[in-house]
Image (spheres, grey):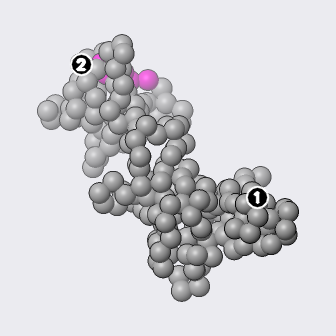
Amino acid sequence: MESSKHGLDGSKVVPGDKICLAKDVSAGKGCYIRGASVYASAVGSLKISAGDNGKREASVLLEEGRQYASSQVLSIGHRVLGKVTRIMNNTATIEIVAANEIGPLREKNSGIIRKEDVRVAATEEVQIYESFRPGDIVYAKVISLGDSRRYFLSTAENELGVIRAVSASSGEVMVPISWKEMQCPKTNVKEARKVAKPKE
């Protein structure tokens, strides 16, 4: 449907309905932006309300008991929590378990951190095995939707990277001692990681 629903607060919408121009209104729950316009992604009643930044926000109110189909779908920019399941020469495979603003994910999602997305540096200096190990818990950002439900992730920002790792020598949870090393508190053995710097 191409007719604009802008200003028709309370009107019924279905997925694909064009609501208005994105320059006028931001997309809230049940809506998405494609090109220069905001569209509905759910069946329900349109609601136009004041957004956080002063710009009006379009959202779709669902019938009682229904959930947004896209409420568990990751998008570019989401910060996610995941477990490293496999290491290869140029990639680390991550099982994504949760995301900011979504919480725990009901379905399994797989992510890939490529060598060039580990940190801000010359790619040839990055070694995947010195950045992650199987079992590590990482905090990362979705940078691309990838293919076949595998998201491309990045840990290049300072606050992204390994947040929990277990020592290979003792099985103890290690503590970060720098942006690239963690240490076992029991044996003092150090292991290389791309460590997430906590926000001040």
Main SS of the magenta part reads strand
Q: CA distance from mark 1 to mark 2?
A: 56 Å
For the point 85% across and 69% down, which residue is it? 188
Say whether residue 174 is left or right of residue 132: right
Say whether residue 85 is left or right of residue 38: right
Q: Quadrant of the N terminus?
A: top left
Tag count: 2
Query: Dot 2 corresponds to which residue?
Result: 12
On whether residue 47 falls in the magenta region, the answer is yes
Which residues make up the magenta segment?
45-49
Please name whichever residue, 151 or 52, is drawn nearer the observer in this view of the structure: 151
Query: Dot 1 corresponds to which residue?
Result: 172
Question: Three-letter amino acid code at disc 2?
Answer: Lys
For the point 32% across and 32% down, which residue is it? 69
- Give x and y (percent) for residue 154: 51, 63
For the point 53% across and 82% down, which residue is it? 123
- Give x and y (percent) for residue 110: 42, 55
- Give x and y (percent) for residue 74: 41, 46
